[in-house]
């Protein structure tokens, strides 16, 4: 089965168009304009150019839809029913350093529920797609989360903290505690791809704090439609677009959740 809803078709078309200039930019990184948004947080001319193409393509079909993007912010704020959630380059630091571990991430949300999402790594030519009720796919092949049953055998992935984080010690302590109880932990530098890799079984689980909604919106439906579990923990109601997330297969989800909640490091 190939996903072919109007929203999925529109998103994939936008991703393919934006990826052409993104691939060129990746080959000419030294020529890009780069500015700092904060400590360890950068934006490039490629981020802005990619976002512009994506917005233009999506607005051609639905000019009235709301849009939440990493660089521009909120567009058509009055439309709370239909929203695109866009991260033009998730993994900008990897991109800047010539590491091909970054992706375009787009989700479509209707009545506050994510209906479909696409994560596309243009360098690897891997397109992850998911649609509510219709499953998750990698380049048109159905994907599922892993079936790893024992947490001691699990390979997890995480990310952070950024330079401006105020909870670095908490994040590092959490990392130590979890890593002692699993097979290994990786850090790849792209939340979107981390979640896509959980969805297709490359990783058994993923957790991270201090994420933005656009980092993970498409990944949420990918993991769910691939049979995985999603959990938000220690949410800050004053910052609804900031998230702490856990994504994994169902077998080890509760055990990872317990390790995250554990306060003392043995």
Image (tube, helix red, strand yellow):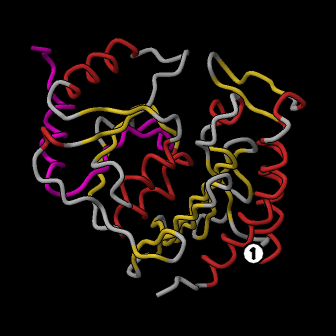
* Magenta-span inclusion, residue 258: yes
Vertically, is 147 above or below 47?
Answer: below
Q: Is 93 located above or below residue 145 in the figure?
A: above
Q: Position of residue 197 (x, y in %)?
A: 42, 53
Question: Callout 1: 10 Å neighbours few (<14), some, many (20+)?
Answer: few
Name the spot of residue 51 as percent of width and height, x first.
77, 51
Question: What residue lies at 46% left-to-right and 88% top-to-bottom?
Answer: 1
Quadrant for the C terminus, please: top left
77 is higher (above) or lower (below) than 181: below
Q: Is residue 106 left or right of residue 49?
A: left
Figure disc tally: 1
Task: Name which residue lies at 74% across and 21% down.
Answer: 36
Residue 208, by quadrant, is top left
Q: Which residue is tagged 1?
A: 62
* Local secondary structure at mark 1: loop
What residue do we see at 26% from left, 32% from top? 184
Left or right of 16, for residue 85: left
Q: What residue is drawn where x is 42% and y is 51%? A: 195
Residue 82 within the magenta-colored segment of the rendering:
no
Closest to the observer, 4 or 21: 21
**As displayed, is residue 24 above or below residue 135?**
above
Position of residue 84 measured from the top left corner of the image (x, y, whole percent) = 63, 62
Which quadrant would residue 30 be assigned to in this image? Answer: top right
Q: Which residues are magenta?
A: 237-266
Q: Answer left or right for 148 relative to 37.
A: left
The foreground one among 66 and 157 is: 157
**Residue furthest toward the right?**
31
82 sits to left or right of 155: right
x then y, percent, for residue 11:
66, 70
């Amino acid at each position: 089965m190939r996903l072919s809803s109007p929203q999925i078709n529109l998103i994939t078309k936008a991703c393919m168009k934006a990826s052409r200039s993104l691939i060129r930019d990746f080959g000419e990184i030294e020529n890009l304009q780069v500015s700092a948004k904060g400590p360890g947080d950068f934006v490039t001319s490629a981020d802005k150019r990619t976002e512009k193409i994506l917005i233009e393509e999506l607005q051609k079909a639905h000019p009235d839809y709301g849009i939440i993007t990493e660089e521009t912010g909120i567009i058509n704020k009055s439309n709370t029913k239909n929203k695109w959630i866009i991260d033009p380059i998730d993994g900008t630091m990897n991109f800047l350093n010539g590491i091909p571990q970054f992706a375009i991430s787009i989700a479509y949300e209707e009545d506050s529920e994510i209906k479909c999402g696409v994560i596309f790594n243009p360098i690897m030519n891997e397109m992850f797609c998911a649609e509510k009720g219709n499953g998750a796919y990698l380049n048109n092949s159905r994907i599922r989360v892993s079936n790893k049953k024992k947490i001691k055998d699990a390979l997890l992935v995480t990310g952070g903290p950024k330079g401006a984080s105020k909870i670095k010690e908490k994040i590092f302590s959490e990392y130590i505690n979890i890593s002692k109880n699993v097979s290994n932990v990786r850090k790849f530098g792209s939340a979107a791809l981390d979640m896509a890799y959980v969805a297709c079984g490359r990783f058994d689980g993923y957790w991270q704090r201090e994420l933005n909604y656009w980092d993970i919106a498409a990944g949420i439906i990918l993991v769910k439609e691939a049979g995985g579990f999603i959990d938000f923990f220690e949410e800050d109601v004053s910052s609804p677009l900031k998230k702490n997330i856990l994504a994994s297969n169902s077998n080890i989800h509760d055990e990872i959740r317990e390790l995250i909640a554990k306060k003392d490091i043995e």
